[in-house]
């Protein structure tokens, strides 16, 4: 096998040797290191054999001396195939043109990938980038990523960070959005610190203003923690921008209900595949109009980009949609599983809150009533409270008095 | 009186081979044949005498090796070795 592959790359000639002393010529070949193989007797005075290309030219010298005639029956191997291509000028011109096209087009952006969008849409980011010169079809040499990043950050106050990486024909944009800043009262404006949640004061530190509560005192939303009005011993009133850090001990009870019997989606085994081709921004569906192949189904989509390597991506993608038929099967929910699920879910709900919460202790109970599981989670927490409210604008909360 | 016996060259080589534990065929240049798997590999040949699908005669030192059978084919050959493939019926040594 290896020899055959080697002979294919070197090239070989199939010849027919005719004459009275064919064996003599074969002996001469062997004596002069002319490699030949696959010798087959075709008639009493002729044999067919394969010889290498350089061996063929050496063999011709000896053919006359041994009174044999050589006729070429066929040529095999890569050298002959490539030689056949040499005269195909249009093919070479096409290949050169193709290479030139790829070289020219590799200087432009073909695909842009935006990551990290949460509240902003990708379209908004892309339009901002397009305004500053980064869009599909833009020249890669003309893109100054540092300047682009600075310009976009100056244009919008919704982004905290943006990075632009141009790799070959692909641009990778990563964004981080700014969180919503709390309403702050300017430092030179007098204000009070008002509680925004109920609890028992656990820690209190007043940096500026008059403290109105003490540690261990119960407070309700709207109660003033630190007042911006300061009265001197002479009875002189002075208004300041109050500043205080207050932590309150709070108790939370979360309740979650879950039916003891649920519906489960089981795959039936039937599936259908649909294909689509995305070229640039255009999607070509390679299927007939069929909105839902099954009444109930799981859908998974796989998008494969045509790429040469990581940095050289074509703006063409092949989409495979897999629809797997499913049917609803009634099933009983396991109590342990339900408890674990509900506990996880409730914890994630309060952890997703914006305030800084430290959980001191936590307990979970599960009860079954009227065909449903009821989960109750009780947590003791330490939470930070206190918002700045301008003096005299605390009407909606009420005061301590 | 003891008569001196003349030792021929081949006898001397045989004795040397025996004395030095060397393969006799190598020292004498005799052909070596490996037969198996529908193939005959012959070493130390001296050229082909006759070639056909039924019979191939190969010259060797002091003898001719006749390989007979059907569908015989000379697969490869060089200065010292040759390989024959086909249905081998008999291998004869003709002096």
Image: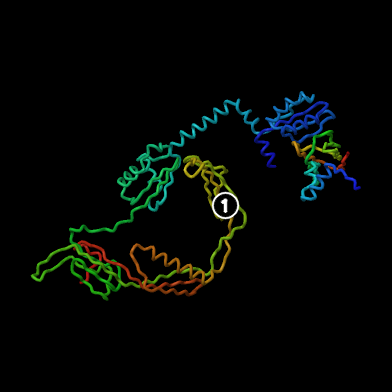
Of the 4 image quadrants, the one containing the N terminus of chain A is top right
- Front in this rendered view, residue A183 or A143: A143
Q: SS of the residue at dot 1?
A: strand
How far across and down, in percent of the image, does residue A222 sit?
A: 26, 67
Residue that badge 1 annotates: A323
Would you say A236 lies left or right of A56 here? left
Residue A275 can be seen, yes or no = yes
Would you say A130 lies left or right of B17 here? left
- Front in this rendered view, residue A295 or B6: B6
Measured along the vertical axis of the image, is residue A379 above or below residue A178? below
Q: Residue at x 15, y 63 (%)?
A: A239
Query: Which quarter of the figure has residue A61?
Result: top right
Measured along the vertical axis of the image, is residue A30 above or below residue A129? above
Q: Residue at x 43, y 67 (%)?
A: A346
Query: Which quarter of the figure has residue A219?
Result: bottom left
Residue sitting farthest toward the left: A234
Would you say A399 lies left or right of A172 here? left
């Amino acid at each position: 096998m290896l020899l055959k592959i080697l002979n294919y790359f070197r090239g070989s000639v199939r010849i027919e040797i005719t004459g009275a002393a064919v064996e003599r010529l074969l002996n001469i070949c062997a004596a002069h290191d002319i490699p030949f193989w696959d010798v087959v007797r075709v008639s009493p005075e002729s044999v067919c054999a394969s010889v290498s290309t350089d061996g063929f030219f050496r063999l011709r010298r000896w053919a006359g001396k041994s009174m044999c005639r050589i006729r070429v029956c066929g040529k095999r191997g890569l050298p002959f195939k490539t030689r056949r291509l040499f005269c195909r000028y249009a093919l070479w011109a096409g290949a050169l043109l193709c290479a030139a096209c790829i070289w020219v087009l590799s200087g432009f952006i073909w695909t842009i990938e935006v990551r990290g969008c949460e509240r902003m849409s990708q379209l908004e980011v892309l339009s901002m980038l397009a305004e500053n010169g980064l869009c599909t079809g833009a020249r890669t040499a003309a893109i100054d990523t540092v300047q682009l990043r600075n310009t976009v950050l100056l244009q919008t106050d919704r982004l905290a960070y943006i990075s632009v990486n141009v790799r070959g024909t692909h641009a990778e944009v990563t964004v981080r959005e700014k969180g919503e800043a709390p309403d702050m009262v300017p430092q030179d404006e007098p204000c009070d610190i008002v509680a925004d949640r109920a609890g028992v004061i656990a820690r209190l530190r007043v940096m500026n203003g008059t403290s109105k509560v003490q540690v261990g005192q119960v407070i309700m939303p709207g109660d003033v923690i630190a007042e911006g009005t300061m009265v001197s011993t002479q009875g002189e009133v002075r208004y300041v921008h109050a500043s205080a850090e207050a932590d309150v001990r709070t108790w939370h009870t979360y309740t979650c209900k879950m039916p003891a019997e649920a519906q489960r989606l089981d795959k039936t085994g039937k599936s259908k595949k649909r294909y689509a081709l995305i070229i640039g921004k255009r999607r070509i569906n390679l299927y007939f109009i069929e909105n839902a192949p099954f009444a109930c189904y799981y859908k998974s989509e796989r998008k494969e980009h045509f790429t040469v390597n990581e940095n050289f991506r074509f703006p063409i993608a092949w989409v495979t949609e897999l629809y797997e038929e499913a049917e609803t099967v009634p099933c009983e929910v396991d109590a342990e599983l339900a408890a674990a699920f509900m506990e996880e879910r409730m914890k994630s709900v309060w952890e997703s809150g914006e305030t800084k919460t430290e959980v001191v202790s936590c307990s979970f109970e599960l009860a079954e009533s009227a065909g449903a599981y009821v989960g109750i989670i009780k947590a003791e927490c330490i939470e930070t409270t206190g918002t700045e409210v301008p003096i005299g604008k605390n009407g909606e909360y009420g005061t301590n008095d | 009186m003891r008569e001196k016996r003349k030792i021929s060259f081949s006898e001397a080589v045989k004795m040397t081979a025996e004395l030095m534990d060397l393969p006799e065929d190598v020292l004498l240049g005799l052909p070596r044949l490996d037969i198996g798997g529908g193939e005959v590999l012959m070493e130390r040949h001296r050229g082909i005498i006759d070639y056909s699908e039924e019979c191939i005669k190969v010259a060797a030192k002091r003898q001719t090796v006749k390989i007979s059978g059907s569908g015989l084919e000379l697969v490869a050959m060089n200065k010292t070795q040759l390989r024959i493939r086909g249905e081998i019926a008999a291998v004869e040594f003709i002096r």
